[in-house]
């Protein structure tokens, strides 16, 4: 009569039949393991803005995993760069530059900051023109004085479209710079 095998022995026999993982399969498993860690570190960095924490957490990883996790963090930070959220650009830039120490990455981050400044100035001028036009409309309707305090340019669809059209070329240029940064920021 045959002996009874434990579940572990049965699983081990099946695993032996399957053989070892190919190098591609091992790399895929490593990526699958490291990607969530990198995304989590990027989110924690974005909430804390502490580059020392980011570097300390990366140093806890083995060298192969550290590289993959760093790439994931970099990609997550680059993806978060958005014209509508210019206030956190400096924090995102610090995180990117703490990981990608290439001269090209430094130059590209500088170009992105210049683009943000140019967009803010252009948007300010456009907002002033829209507010002036809105004031003229209210004046024609004989609404003035304390009845209004400030015009909400977000409220009118045509004004919002005008601001979106203004942002479109800046967003296209930002996308190109983000792609350039992503390519140059390989650690």
Image (cartoon, rainbow, N blue to C red):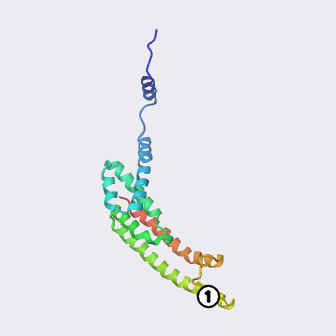
Above or below, 148 against 175 in this view is below
Q: Quadrant of residue 94?
A: bottom left
- Looking at the image, the residue that sits furthest to the front is 146
- The image shows residue 172, relative to residue 121, as above or below, that is above
Q: Position of residue 41 (x, y in %)?
A: 40, 55
Total marks placed: 1
Answer with left or right where residue 83 lies relative to residue 152: left
Q: Looking at this view, is 60 or 148 the one in front?
A: 148
Instruction: Give the class, few, some or many, for how many residues have Cα within 10 Å of label 1's Cα (few <14, many ≥20).
Output: some
Of residues 140 and 81, the one nearer the viewer is 140
For image coordinates 42% across by 66% down, the residue present is 181
Residue 149 relative to residue 44: left or right: right
Q: In the figure, 30 relative to 148: above or below?
A: above
Residue 156, given in percent of the width and then of the height, sits at 64, 77
Specify the quadrant of the image occupied by residue 155: bottom right
> Residue at the location (46% across, 72% down)?
86
Identify the residue position indicated by label 1 in the image: 135
State the residue lying farthest toward the top: 1
The quarter in which the C terminus is drawn is bottom left
- Residue at point 31%, 47% (across, down): 62
Q: Position of residue 87 (x, y in %)?
A: 44, 72
- Position of residue 139 relative to residue 59, above or below, is below
* Mark 1 secondary-structure assignment: helix
The residue sitting at the right extreme is 141
């Amino acid at each position: 009569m045959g002996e009874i095998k434990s579940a572990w022995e049965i699983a081990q026999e099946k695993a032996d039949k399957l053989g070892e993982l190919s190098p591609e399969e091992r790399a895929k498993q490593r990526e699958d393991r490291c990607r969530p860690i990198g995304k989590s570190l990027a989110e924690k960095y974005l909430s804390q803005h502490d580059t020392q924490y980011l570097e300390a957490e990366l140093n806890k990883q083995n060298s192969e995993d550290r590289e993959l996790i760093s790439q994931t963090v970099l990609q997550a930070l680059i993806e978060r760069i958005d014209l509508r959220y210019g206030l956190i650009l400096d924090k995102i830039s610090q995180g990117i530059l703490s990981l990608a120490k290439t001269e090209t990455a430094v130059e590209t981050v500088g170009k992105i900051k210049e683009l943000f400044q140019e967009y803010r100035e252009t948007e300010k001028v456009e907002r002033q023109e829209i507010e002036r036009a809105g004031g003229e409309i209210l004046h024609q309707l004989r609404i003035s004085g304390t009845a209004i305090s400030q015009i909400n340019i977000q409220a009118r669809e045509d004004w919002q479209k005008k601001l979106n059209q203004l942002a479109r070329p800046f967003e296209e240029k930002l996308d190109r710079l983000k792609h350039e940064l992503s390519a140059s920021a390989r650690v």
